Image (cartoon, coloured by chain):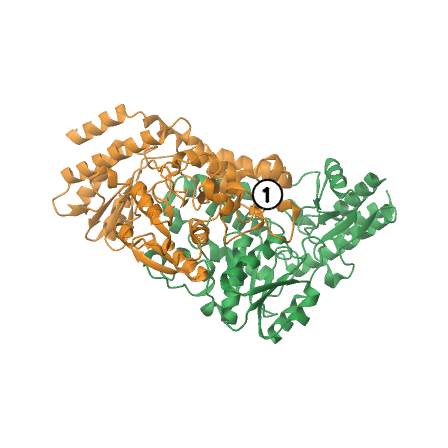
Chain colours: A green, B orange
Amino acid sequence: MSELTLRAKQLDAADELAPLRSRFALDDVVYLDGNSLGALPAHVPDRLADVVRREWGELRIRSWTESGWWTAPERIGDRIAPLVGAAPGQVVVGDSTSVNVFKALVGAVRLAGDDRTEILVDATTFPTDGYIAESAARLTGRTLRALTPEEVPGALGPRTAAVLLNHVDYRTGRLHDLPSLTAAIHAAGALAVWDLCHSAGALPVGLDEHGVDLAVGCTYKYLNGGPGSPAFLYVRRELQPRFDSPLPGWNSHADPFGMSPDYAPAPGAVRGRVGTPDILSMLALEAALDVWEGVGIDAVRAKSLALTDFFLECVSAYTEPGRVEPVTPAEHGRRGSQVSLRCADAGEVMKRLIEEGVVGDFRQPDVLRFGFTPLYTTFADAERAARTLAALLG
Amino acid sequence: MSELTLRAKQLDAADELAPLRSRFALDDVVYLDGNSLGALPAHVPDRLADVVRREWGELRIRSWTESGWWTAPERIGDRIAPLVGAAPGQVVVGDSTSVNVFKALVGAVRLAGDDRTEILVDATTFPTDGYIAESAARLTGRTLRALTPEEVPGALGPRTAAVLLNHVDYRTGRLHDLPSLTAAIHAAGALAVWDLCHSAGALPVGLDEHGVDLAVGCTYKYLNGGPGSPAFLYVRRELQPRFDSPLPGWNSHADPFGMSPDYAPAPGAVRGRVGTPDILSMLALEAALDVWEGVGIDAVRAKSLALTDFFLECVSAYTEPGRVEPVTPAEHGRRGSQVSLRCADAGEVMKRLIEEGVVGDFRQPDVLRFGFTPLYTTFADAERAARTLAALLG
């Protein structure tokens, strides 16, 4: 046994989160794509079968009240809230991330007022945020400027309405400095909108602590909610009474069953709802959140850093110098929960890695991505992934 | 056995669609709320269990390609298309009805051009359509005028951009004249946007035949897709190249995995997609559509009219004159697939009806709604519902 396989064994033996792996349906594959689609929590199939057979099949329409379907968006939002550092009543689940970016950004622009005419957006963002920001700017008559997160402080001014940033870059795995960027945005009198897709469930976010205004995030990555499970929207409590959604569907009405032709928004997080929630996906997500029982996000973060450190160490030890180049920052304060490696022929390399039972993914043009989900990824996984990669690269 | 129970028996015996009832999980309850939440198709639980356990649990990320997840929105759209009279490639599934109303209405206004400054909306519509129309008008700088469908022809003019109408009124069950209203809208040079929530799967719509421009609809009523299953959007083929979505998420990009910072819309129905589709809800819907195998929408319509005729006849025969008043038009050409009865104490009456095993629903202020889903509702159901109602009313 090599020194690193032995180290992996010791690290796994000492890992307090190790027992959580049994809460998931996993096999011999080294699954390092939980930053794209989280693994299946083992108890979700039985719960969803009950939702389908009994709640839909037997109770039918009665389940909207008797099975708590109607209040699921805000109830599940409150389950996610502690993982992103939010007190209850500020997070609501529903719609896709893209749709929530639209609500958040148009809402932010309206909160900022008419004399603030510019939106800033992270130019390195996952593309959908940029596309939606462009639409939000066009529909609200604002201009849009794309720039790197580093350039944001220098670009802020009295005309800045809102800034849309990613907490962790989807491609490089770089963690941006949410507290200081939010403070800079506030100092300019603008609103900070954060996309937490690659940080929710992976590391502490501290939405309330840092005074973030609005945030959106995805639930099918580190929150393991299932393919395309509904996204979430956070609106800071003090802003809620003035939050003016561009998608004021009947679910956000103060009295939805009053069926009034006049719109009157509900108070609280419910104001971020739109139409009828997709119950099957939503209740699968609710069940998936049970795996967090007794788990603190700080412990998750500590293991995430240990895993990515160890993976980088193994890659460095096993791989010929120059064959891959880490893109993810070495500094802990700038690293999310994934490791991206630049590599020639990355597409072909990932294809072969997957054939060898190590699942990461490929991002154009030359990036191998490996996501580390501390709830179920082991140090042995990290070592095996690095060893398999090195063997492939020859 | 009374004359009407005998008639019900004979009608059920002669009903060619009667065997379809066995495709659903039903019990002794008379379920007349399929216009709110369709009953569970019997094979859906097993299919969804496979999606969860094997496609998500075992194949994980590979299912986006290997299990056909990525193309589900347009594939399922093409399954719905024949039921609403659309050729393939014009319907896409995803998001809620409210979100699709927003896409359709903003898209229609943009197609109409800048010199058309007014949107007309059905004042009797399900409220969400009115709320969203108000938001669409506000964001596109148009005015919004609410009026009854009868008033639409007289209100059309050179400034009309688009008209949003309901095919069947959710409260009264009244069917509006889609062909003639669409023709009048087109004669004024405006675009017709139809909400098919209460007609898709209940009666022939003829979207292509009547030249409808855009349409939206729900899949959890007469299409039995499950609670909150994703809605659909129809964009007429000739308009697709100019359809300019206000929600241009990455799923609507011509090359979504190219991850380009510049937006370039996909051709065809895919342009109506937004973010990552909620796969669990979507594949439950896909399975649910199997119940339509070998079923024509004309036969469904014929049975729907026979059922509602028979129910009205039974109500009239069993109930003291004046206790209830049908709100739904008697004329076939103006009737959807539900019967609404005005009734004193309607809320309390419906509560007691449900206790007696007859499930309809109550709409403010005084309406009892009974939905008839020809795929599984029997004439015996109609007779028993009327008899139970009459007994309750004393």
The subunit carrying tag 1 is A
Q: Residue B392: where, in percent of width, then height?
A: 19, 45
B380 over A158 or under it: above or below:
above
B379 over A19 or under it: above or below:
above
Quadrant of the rendering where the N terminus of chain B is positioned: top left
Dot 1 surroundings within 10 Å: few (below 14), some, or many (20 or more)? some
What's the residue at 28%, 31% (across, down)?
Answer: B302
Quadrant of the rendering where the C terminus of chain B is positioned: top left
Answer yes or no: is residue A74 visible.
yes
Q: Taking B63 as reference, is A93 left or right?
A: left
Residue nearest the observer in this picture, A113 or A96: A113
Q: Residue A79: where, in percent of width, then height?
A: 53, 57
In terms of secondary structure, where does tag 1 sit? loop
A155 over B332 or under it: above or below:
below
Disc 1 residue type? Ala
A144 over A19 or under it: above or below:
below
Q: Residue furthest left?
A: B321
What's the residue at 39%, 35% (across, down)?
Answer: B85
Q: Residue B121: where, in percent of width, then height?
A: 34, 54
Answer yes or no: is residue A276 visible.
no
Corner quadrant of residue B334: top left
Q: Tell me the residue that label 1 is attached to.
A: A42
Residue nearest the observer in this picture, A348 or A217: A348
Q: Residue B248: where, in percent of width, then height?
A: 54, 51
Q: Taking B13 as reference, is A211 left or right?
A: right
Count of number-bearing discs: 1
